[in-house]
Amino acid sequence: MINTKKIWMNGEMIDHDNANVHVLSHVMHYGTSFFEGIRAYKTEEGTAIFRLDEHIDRLYNSCKIYRTEIPYTKEEIKKAISDTIKINGIKTAYIRPLVYRGYNSLGVNPSNCPVETMIATWEWGAYLGEEALTQGVDVCVSSWRRLAPNTMPTAAKAGGNYLSSQLIKVEALENGYDEGIALDYSGNVSEGSGENLFVISNGKIYSPQSGSSALIGITRDSVITIARDLGYEVVEETISRESLYTADELFFSGTAAEITPIASVDKIKIGIGKRGPITEKIQEAFFEMTEGKNIKYNSWLTYIK
Ligand code: PMP
């Protein structure tokens, strides 16, 4: 169970045990939800939420794609997030705002069902394990492809999309891997089940371009900025499956996964088989930034007052 006391639900702080939805809610039957995963970090000046504006913009865009109007302003949602962290008395947080279609009728058309909103916050450590941040994770190329662009929009962070993620993740775990990498509809590299991917070869950093059916990750965008500021060339382009095997370093990026190195793909050792030197530099700069220790990126942090 998730350890949190109060959950913000439709404008009110509700006790964890009472934050329930009806079984006939539209979201239960058709995956009608849009959400974000955001982290807040402990800094010397208190808790700071990482790239809050970008996450909130993506939440509103996910809803817009599905013609869903959130009945709150962005400012109200941002305040509710801060309030939820504060009321739970936590110093670091994983933040989960979720907009979903509630209970009215059960036709496929969601438009008669109320748009409901919840925000939960809790302390959540390294998503793929603390050790993975240095030792890396063992991954496979999934037999499941990512959604093709003319099927479901991958730019929307929608609950239903995560059935695809679950197929990738569960298959990987069943076969003894930590995570799976999915190819896109054309057979090129897309992303992990909940992470974007970076490939390092001959000192250059590559990431699949936006047409690869991957979510446009906010951590990915931060990594690209940080890597360029460190002097690396970053190229967004089509990445073939085999270039994973021959890479010098690979790593995942994501709000939950942060910067997680990849040690092997399909049992083929990548580089030195653990966190490589360029990944280490980027990871270091990333955590320095989230801890508020690099003023260059201070505009990415929203301090909770
Ligand atoms: N891809 C998928 C499928 C994800 O679920 C996530 C996590 N939100 C990411 C990539 C990484 O995105 P972000 O850096 O914005 O968390």
Image (tube, grey):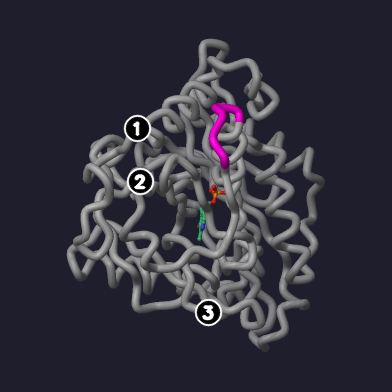
Q: Which element type, helix, strand or loop, lies under badge 3?
A: loop
Q: Secondary structure at mark 2?
A: strand
Give residue 186's mark: 3
Q: CA distance from mark 1 to mark 2?
A: 8 Å
Amino acid type shown at disc 1: Pro
Query: Would you say 84 lies left or right of 112 here?
Result: left
Q: Quick one: 84 or 144, which is closer to the camera? A: 144
Magenta span: 229-233
Percent x, y for residue 54? 69, 43
Residue type highlighted by circle 2: Glu
| Residue 7 visible (yes or no) | no
Q: Residues within 10 Å of mark 3 (few under 14, many from 20)?
A: few
Tell me, for residue 277, which label it has, or none.
1
Residue at figure coordinates x 77%, y 40% from the top left: 76
Q: CA distance from mark 3 to mark 2?
A: 24 Å
Q: In percent of the image, x 58 and y 59: which residue is there?
A: 237
Q: Looking at the picture, how far across and down is residue 302, in whole percent?
A: 66, 26
- At label 3, the amino acid type is Ser
> Residue at the spot x=49%, y=65% of the render?
190
Rendered location of residue 167, percent (x, y)? 37, 74
- Residue hosting label 2: 249
Is 105 colored magenta in this rendering? no
Identify the residue shown where x is 28% and y is 36%. Answer: 130
**Does 126 sit left or right of 194 as displayed?**
left
Whether pointer 1 and pointer 2 mark residues with C-beta atoms closer than 8 Å, the reply is: yes
